[in-house]
Amino acid sequence: MPYTRMHHDVDPKESILKELGDISGIEVFNTHVLIATYVRPNKTKSGIHLTDKYVEEDKYQGKVGLVVKKGPLAFVDEEQDWFKGVEVNVNDWVFYRPSDGWSMNVHGIQCRVLRDIDIRGRVPAPDAVW
């Protein structure tokens, strides 16, 4: 996994999707995006152990997440002002400001609903940024 700073026993994307389970019944409207929040494991690649406080804080202050659902108008811009050349898809890792999203729990996974314009960028791996 590129850019990873944390020790992952399991691929974080696979883990989130497995724990999230079937979300086919969840519908996201308009320009909104449902993002599963990335929660760091408690051990870095270099062997440093993070306290439970840091890990727990990621649930509410995490800045990176996995796109798991998109509304039908998300990232659609008829005038090409906002999203020219940008395509964000389900299973992309993205970063955002936590205060921009509405926090919710879906099947035990901490998630956020954000407007498409509140997603600031994409990263190749969830711990590429802190």
Image: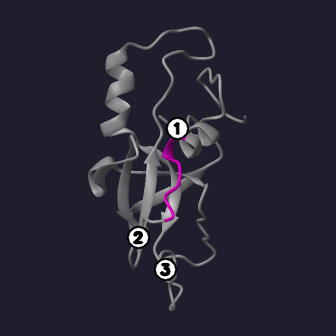
Q: Which quadrant of the structure image shows residue 109?
A: top left
Residue 28 disc label: 2
Measured as percent of width and height from the top left, residue 85 is found at 64, 75
Which residue is at a point 58% across and 66% down the rendered structure image?
A: 88
Which residue is at a point 52% across and 38% down the rendered structure image?
A: 129
Measured as percent of width and height from the top left, residue 122 is found at 57, 54
Q: Secondary structure at mark 1?
A: loop
Q: Please state which of the two labelled residues, at mark 2 or mark 1, is closer to the viewer.
A: 2
Mark 3: amino acid? Pro
Q: Which quadrant of the structure image shows residue 118?
A: bottom left
Q: CA distance from mark 2 to mark 3?
A: 8 Å
Residue 86 is left or right of residue 36, and the answer is right
Residue marked by disc 3? 72
Query: From the viewer's perspective, is residue 14 above or below residue 93?
Result: above
Q: CA distance from mark 2 to mark 1?
A: 27 Å
**Range drawn in magenta:** 19-24
Q: Secondary structure at mark 2?
A: loop
The one of 86 and 31 positioned closer to us in this rendering: 31
Residue 8 disc label: none
Measured as percent of width and height from the top left, residue 53 is found at 31, 19
Q: Please state which of the two labelled residues, at mark 1 or mark 3, is closer to the viewer.
A: 3
Residue 52 is left or right of residue 124, and the answer is left
Residue marked by disc 1? 129
Contact (Cβ within 8 Å) of mark 1 with mark 3: no
Q: CA distance from mark 1 to mark 3?
A: 28 Å
